[in-house]
Image (cartoon, rainbow, N blue to C red):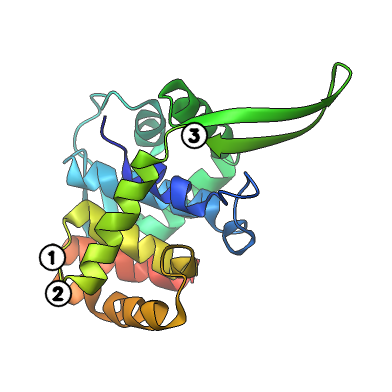
Amino acid sequence: MKLSIAEAYYLIALDDEEGRILAAAERTVVPSVISACILELYLLKKISLHGGIVKVLDTVGTGNGILDNVLKKLKNGVQIVDQVKALSAKFKDIEVDLNALLVQRGILKKEETKLLWIPLSERMENANYAFEQNIRNALKAIVFKSAKPSPPLTILFCLIDYTNILDEVFRDRDELIDAEKVGKEITDKAGISDALATSLNSLKGFLG
């Protein structure tokens, strides 16, 4: 089972102990997920990103409901940051969709606290931590083993870095320093296209 970039980002942004989004990511989780979707659609050749401007090339669905919903709402000729802003307003409840998808896949499970029959609180817990562990291992290999990141991992690393949750993956202070150094150079060294690098740099200013 392959996770989308948006799903991978969401798993990292979800506090494993509290069962809710990390405080540092609360403001940016929706635009980050939307950004991940748009950039994955680029990798899937559903859109182009010349100079950060979105052009829809193929409207056939990907099989991932969240990606497909974003694809349907994209507008031609609009800069990626403006697309993210507009779609973040339209998909402000995208976390609900992600929770439902990840529960359906058996990756997360919903836990409710009730008083009699009245729900008091809700939290999301890992039902299969192997998926998140694989993500963390891949990110750490980029930093500690000089592994060349694939374009999806480059996007994921950048979004985690831009939204100040690198310390969720690299919790030791020295490890975090090393990860931050990698983050400063990753778009130059990953071998990604100029179009993707330009779009990521635009998002850095918006999400950071």
**Circle 3 residue:** 98
62, above or below 168, in the image? above
Report whether 104 appears left or right of 130: right
Cβ–Cβ under 8 Å for marks 3 and 2: no
Cβ–Cβ under 8 Å for marks 1 and 2: yes
User: Would residue 24 be seen by someone viewing this image from the given angle?
Assistant: yes
Q: Nearer the viewer, mark 1 or mark 2?
A: 1
User: Would residue 77 be seen by someone viewing this image from the given angle?
Assistant: no
Quadrant of the frame with the N terminus: top left
Q: As drawn, which residue projects farthest toward the right?
A: 116
The alpha-carbon separation of the residues under discs 1 and 2 comes to 8 Å
Disc number placed over residue 148 in the picture, else none:
1
**Circle 2 residue:** 189
Residue neighbourhood size for the residue with mark 2, other residues' Cα within 10 Å, grouped as few (<14), some (14–19), many (≥20): few
Picture coordinates of residue 104 (x, y %)? Answer: 45, 21
The alpha-carbon separation of the residues under discs 3 and 2 comes to 31 Å
Q: Residue at x 31, y 83 (%)?
A: 181
First in sequence: mark 3 vs mark 2: 3
Residue neighbourhood size for the residue with mark 1, other residues' Cα within 10 Å, grouped as few (<14), some (14–19), many (≥20): some
> Given the image, on which type of amino acid does mark 2 rest?
Lys
Q: Nearer the viewer, residue 98 or 105?
A: 105
